[in-house]
Image (cartoon, grey):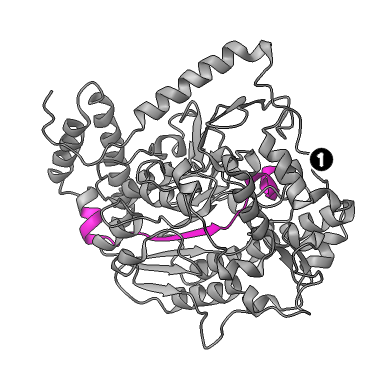
Amino acid sequence: MPRKKYSADFKAKIAIEALQKRKRDVMKTERDGSETRGLKKISNFFKGNNCLGLNHYNHTMKRPNIVLLIAEELGYNFLGYAGNRESETPFLDKLTGKSVTFCNHFTVQGKCVPSRAALYSGRYPHNGGHRTLGIELQKGEISLAKLLKEHGYFNIMAIKNHTIDKAVFHEQIDEFWLDGSNGRKPVNIKDYNGDTTSHERVSGNKYADNYLFGKINMQEKDTCDYIATERACEFIRNHKMSQPFFMNLNFHYTHPPYEIMEPYYSHFMSKDLTLFPNFPGNNKPEFIYKMHDLYGFSRLDPNDRKEMLACYYGMLNFLDNRVREIYETLEHTGQLENTIFIFTSDHGDLVGQHGIPEKWDTIFSDNIMKIPLIIHYPQIFSPRKINALTENIDVLPLLLELIGIDRPYGIQGKNLMPVMRGETNKHKDYVFAEGGHEKDLLEIKIEPNQDRLHIVGYLKKAEMREIMPDALRKAKMIRTEKYKLVYRIKDKNEFYDLVNDPLEQENCYDKVEFADLITRMEKLLLDHLIESEENLPFDPSPIS
């Protein structure tokens, strides 16, 4: 029988997989020694393998493109594939059948800039001081874009930044698509007139105070997300460069205001939608009740609250279409096979849970902290659903291994490779998150950002900061598969039995039957904070 012949690409793929396994084995055997010695041994191992190994892959095979699509303020529980029968995400649902889908993935910070900084750096936000909208990744910090740029990638970011400080932004990003494409500019909120939204946008109006704009009188093709998607597809179709590209689209949807155009609006308003309880819950921290009253959320009747959800689901359905268009363009141009395609979000949104719209830095509800993550790269990974607990800082070490870039010292994320390849069904025993500011920062008088004045709900957030600043004092969360603990500098701590109370309506921190478990979780939180303290700069010769 003639011997079967295999293509060079197939042989390279098998060799890469073998070397990746060897790399993990080396790491495992080195765990009783120093991390530095283990990394040095791995580096030397790869340097010595010149036949169809990782170095061959790096230098003679084109590294894969990376398309990173980040929705704004999208919670996992609102997705169709997550079991939500009122949502409509047909493409994302279909994509999960071809991809690795994470079902218990969490952000480590419930605010956009700190979350994105964590994703790009693989580090917890308290290292680097990432706790506000104004502190993006600084010069000298680990950055996905910087690492890719240094290794030959052409880097694109679209719609918004919220990740890299402007002082180093153009050192890391080759093209920034902010103003549309083909001579078309998007209609932004500051362009809205009195006829653009179905509800008034003035302070004191029950809709405006709760970010509810309702039906918008514009076409989807005029939104920034649509125009950026057009430009992304055009770039992919015309891509002729030999160098790989990294494309990060930071979509605006599903961030409030809660708004959507036709036909999405009427479609979701015609459905029966399940509303969250119009009440913060029992034994909650005092600031949550204060926020509920300050927004005047109880002024919204059931149809208003339905409209809020309908707009959110409409934005998500709109977004599903944009993700599909980018994926299909990669597929039709023959570039999908060599592209790591990722869909995720920075954090979620309450959408009326606890009788509160939008989000708050120190509210750690799963609606905010639990986010989607889908990774499509079939030449390495078979489709599977991952139920293990994972954090968004875990994505960077995975990407670096996939494209053959050495892992910088200081990354705190745990590589997702073993769980994605089915070698284990465990990843982490718990996930961690943080939020809030220090007292000195809260004593600074700030004026509302002029662009944000177009969204009246932000005025309520600013008012809350002034009248109850302790609501923004630092807090930490630790969450296992069954329980969640929130520890606060000020106001009540929280503890939730997630099996029996998935909506987190009953704070059980004061219940005697949970006292021992709470003590153990507080110790676990303390251990984590000590272990995850700043580990940079690296000292190659530590002397006792």
Image quarter of the N terminus: top left
> Would you call the spot at circle 1 few (<14 residues within 10 Å), some (14-19), or many (20 or more)?
few
Q: Is residue 370 at all visible to an observer of this figure?
A: no
Work out whether 487 lies above or below 472.
Answer: above
Residue at the spot of label 1: 277
Q: Is residue 79 at all visible to an observer of this figure?
A: yes
Percent x, y for residue 69? Answer: 51, 60
Percent x, y for residue 496? Answer: 66, 26
Q: Nearer the viewer, residue 419 or 433?
A: 433
Q: Is residue 63 magenta?
A: yes
Residue at the image point whose x is 57% and y is 70% from the top: 450
Work out whether 72 lies above or below 217.
Answer: above
Q: Nearer the viewer, residue 96 or 269?
A: 269
Q: Is residue 173 magenta?
A: no
The image quarter in which residue 493 lies: top right
Image quarter of the C terminus: top left
Q: Which residues are magenta?
A: 56-82
Q: Residue furthest bottom?
A: 183
Residue at the image point whose x is 38% and y is 74% from the top: 175
Q: Is residue 303 left or right of residue 250?
A: right
Residue at the image point whose x is 13% and y is 30% from the top: 542
Percent x, y for residue 391? Answer: 48, 39
Q: Which amino acid type is shown beneath numbered disc 1? A: Pro
Percent x, y for residue 517? Answer: 58, 15
Secondary structure beneath label 1: loop
Residue at the image point whose x is 53% and y is 50% from the top: 111
The image quarter in which residue 246 lies: bottom left
Work out whether 420 lies above or below 140.
Answer: above
Q: Is residue 210 left or right of residue 105?
A: right
Q: Is residue 529 left or right of residue 285?
A: left
